[in-house]
Amino acid sequence: MHTKKIIMNALNNSVTLIGFLGTDVDYSILPSGTKLAKTVIATNSYYKDKNGEKVQKTEWHPVVAWNKTAELMSQLLKKGSQVLIQGQLNHDSYKTKDGEMKYYTQVKINEFKNFTQKDENLPF
């Protein structure tokens, strides 16, 4: 019973996506030394419209990674790379200079797998 509880807690906020990077990885090192990577991942789903025509729907998912994962993403991925990511869904907010509250959602990446074929221009 204890193992079941641990597994359920681990799955409580778990996101897995397979898609393509819509931008190059925006990699930076913060003044604290923390490494940060940001990009967006596009996923596609398909359905038939009222005329029976196949329609592709693309969803864009903002993603963020920290430290070693961020560093590896910046080295191994580029716009168009096909990836599998596993992480957690995070919701947050901030106040603009005008005092307006802005809300956003992003996936915090814990792990990723690069499915893109080796490119001679990449450093690995």
Image: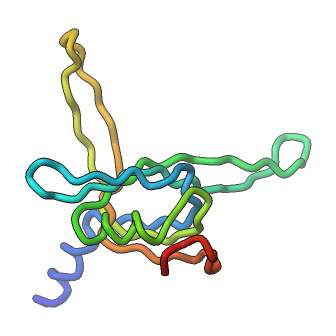
Q: Seen in the image, is 63 located left or right of residue 24? A: left
The image quadrant that residue 71 belongs to is bottom left
Camera-side residue of 109 and 24: 24
The correct choice, above or below, for 70 with respect to 24 in the image is below
Percent across and percent down for residue 17 are 49, 65
**Total of numbered circles in the picture?**
0
Q: Nearer the viewer, residue 108 or 31?
A: 31
Q: Residue at x 25, y 66 (%)?
A: 12
Outermost top residue? 98
Residue 2, located in which quarter of the rendered image? bottom left
The structure residue drawn at horizontal position 20% and vertical position 29%, both measured from the top left corner, is 94
Q: From the viewer's side, name the closer residue of 108 and 27.
A: 27
As displayed, is residue 78 above or below residue 62? Answer: below
Asked whether 71 or 7 is in front, the reply is 71
**In this picture, residue 102 sits left or right of residue 94:** right
- Relative height, residue 99 to residue 106 (above, below): above
Q: Quadrant of residue 5?
A: bottom left
Q: Position of residue 60 (x, y in %)?
A: 53, 46
Q: Residue at x 36, y 72 (%)?
A: 72
Q: Position of residue 113 (x, y in %)?
A: 47, 77
Q: Which corner quadrant holds the N terminus?
A: bottom left
Q: Which residue is drawn at 63% across and 75% down?
A: 119
In the rendered view, tell whether residue 22 sits above or below residue 9. Answer: above
Residue 76 image position (x, y, % from top left): 46, 71
Q: Describe the colour scheme in one phrase.
A: rainbow
